Amino acid sequence: MTTEQPLPADLAAMADEQYISFTTFRRTGVGVATPVWVARDGETLVFTTGLESGKVKRLRNNGDVEIQPCTRTGEVAPDAPTVRAHADVVLDEEGVDAGIASIVEKYGDQARSLMSIGEGQGRPKRAVVRITAR
């Protein structure tokens, strides 16, 4: 986990948000928005999600995404900026650990608690989604 590298200005603005609306696209082109926590990890933004989530499935087909600041419930202000970006699913242990560490660094005990829910109870493994400039 590093923060010394430059982050494009539009992504840097999103790094400070508590939540972002992360929009992936179905094969039909219809967008599906989901509010997520986001943290900076070097030249990218990251968040974590279940390996079997719809976001991961859609990203396997199309890595083009849009992000906007939003509330915890996903409400986006009418004047909120939209950033078009690219996202990749990270599955390797080192990449997942680094992404989760960035989330925990930003969100603290709240993130630690969330990450521990369901551990060892047959819940799906976590993936990290890495957002980069397009």
Image (cartoon, rainbow, N blue to C red):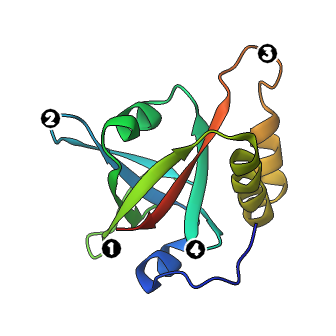
Q: Is residue 121 left or right of residue 37?
A: right
Q: Are marks 1 and 3 in contact (CB under 8 Å)?
A: no
Q: Which of marks 1 and 2 is in front?
A: 2
Q: Nearer the viewer, residue 26 or 72?
A: 26
Residue displayed at 39% across by 41% down: 59
Read off the residue under disc 4.
Answer: 43
Q: Residues within 10 Å of mark 3 (few under 14, many from 20)?
A: few
**Residue 57 falls left or right of residue 45:** left
CA gap, disc 3 and disc 4? 34 Å
The amino acid beneath tag 1 is Ala
Mark 1 highlights which residue? 80
Pointer 2 with pointer 4, Cβ within 8 A: no
Q: Mark 3 or 4 closer to N-term?
A: 4
**Mark 4 residue type:** Glu
Mark closest to the chain's N terminus, 1 or 3: 1
State the separation of the CA atoms marked 2 and 3.
35 Å
Q: How far apart are marks 2 and 4 (CA)?
A: 30 Å
Q: Is residue 105 above or below residue 37?
A: below
Residue matched to label 2: 28
Q: Of the residues under marks 1 and 4, which one precedes in the sequence? A: 4
Q: In this view, does 58 lie to the left or right of 26?
A: right
Label 1 or label 2, whichever comes before in sequence order? 2
Mark 3 against mark 4, which lies toward the viewer?
A: 4
Q: Distance between the residues labelled 1 and 4?
A: 22 Å
